[in-house]
Image: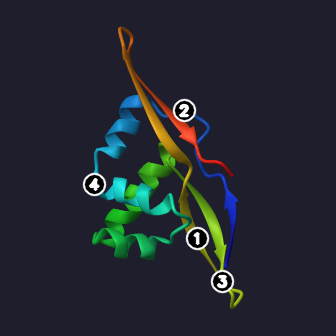
Amino acid sequence: MSTQASNTRSESTPDSAAQLDVLGDECARTIVVATSGGPKTAKELTDRTDSSSATVYRRINNLLESGFLAECVRFEDDGSHTTAYEATVDGLEIDIGPDGIDVTLTATDE
């Protein structure tokens, strides 16, 4: 099995409040943790979260838009391929100051 990443994050930078809102959901946090160990399919994430596939896909889309996940193609030994998702960050820094809250994501090493 091998993976080939393709960046699907939007060009605009997500705002800090949206990033924190995304991580406020337990299902989303479970997805980030699960994909930090390597790419996972939506089916694998559905099994891991004990959530419906519709819920998992909504959380995946939110995590993609917020810069926490990237979409990749996973090639199986039999030649088939499937879409998988992997974490793009391994750290999060939150700064609180007079101008508001700023969230900085630390990218994973490729």
Distance from Cα at disc 3 to Cα at disc 1: 11 Å
Which residue was labeled with disc 4? 26
Name the N-terminal-most of marks 3 and 4: 4
Amino acid at dot 1: Thr
Q: Which mark is residue 83?
A: 1
Helix, strand or loop at label 2? It is: loop
* Circle on res. 76: 3
Classify mark 3: residues with Cα within 10 Å, few (<14), some (14-19) or many (20+): few
User: What amino acid is at disc 3?
Assistant: Glu
- Foreground mark, 1 or 4, reads 4
Q: Are marks 1 and 4 in contact (CB under 8 Å)?
A: no
For the residues labelled 1 and 4, the Cα–Cα distance comes to 23 Å
Answer few, some or many: residues within 10 Å of disc 4's Cα (few below 14, many 20 plus, some between 14 and 19): few
SS under mark 4? helix
Looking at the picture, how far across and down is residue 18, in whole percent? 38, 36
Q: Give the camera-side residue of 59 and 108.
A: 108
Left or right relative to 22: residue 90: right
Disc with the residue nearer the chain's start (2 vs 4): 2
The residue wearing badge 2 is: 13
